[in-house]
Image (cartoon, rainbow, N blue to C red):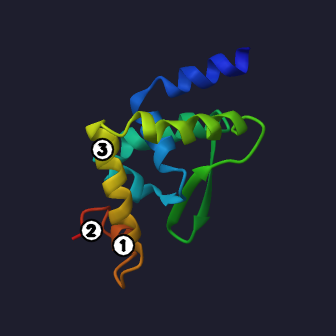
Amino acid sequence: MEDLLNLFGILSDKTRLRILLLLRNELCVCEIYEALEMSQPRVSRQLAILKQARLIKDRREGKWIYYKIEENAHTRYLISILSLLPDWLKDDPEFNNDKAMLKKIHVFRNSPRNCECVLSGGENFGK
């Protein structure tokens, strides 16, 4: 029961929930704060909470840090919960904006300028 309460406590924060919905795909930290249109420190603080709870993991590739949902006993139910939310949130403007930004990220990643977001601190993302 305690694990369930902790999970719902983490999910009760809108920023953390939005991050988790984005991290169904592996993303660079700059892509996360750009998609959420939030400052890097604010997003980093929430990522640290999610990482401490063992819900996400990171990997470093040179200067880049990528995050994704960790696959473990703690996240098995989280992944099930997250899979139900897109239908529930289909009319939510923030969720739809996050979804649109995620599509933009995928297009940007496949462009020749795909590392500019990291090197510029996100300011050139999607331009």
Mark 1 or mark 2: name the one nearer the start of the chain. Answer: 1
Q: Is residue 111 above or below residue 46?
A: below
Which sits in the foreground, 108 or 76?
76
Q: Which residue is mark 1?
A: 107
x and y percentages locating residue 71 in the rendered image: 72, 47
x and y percentages locating residue 43 in the rendered image: 41, 42
Q: Which residue is mark 3?
A: 38
Q: Is residue 95 above or below residue 109?
A: above
At horizontal 36% and vertical 52% (from top left) the residue drawn is 99
Neighbourhood count class around disc 2 (C-alpha, 10 Å): few under 14, some 14–19, many 20 upward: some
Question: Where, quadrant-wise, is the C terminus in this rendering?
Answer: bottom left
Please, what is the three-letter code of the amino acid marked with disc 2? Gly
Q: Which residue is mark 2?
A: 126
Q: Quadrant of residue 38?
A: top left
Of the residues tagged 1 and 2, which is closer to the observer?
1
> Are circles 1 and 2 on residues that touch, CB within 8 Å?
yes
Please, what is the three-letter code of the amino acid marked with disc 3? Met
Mark 1 or mark 3: name the one nearer the start of the chain. Answer: 3
Under circle 2, the secondary element is loop
Q: Is residue 123 left or right of residue 106?
A: left
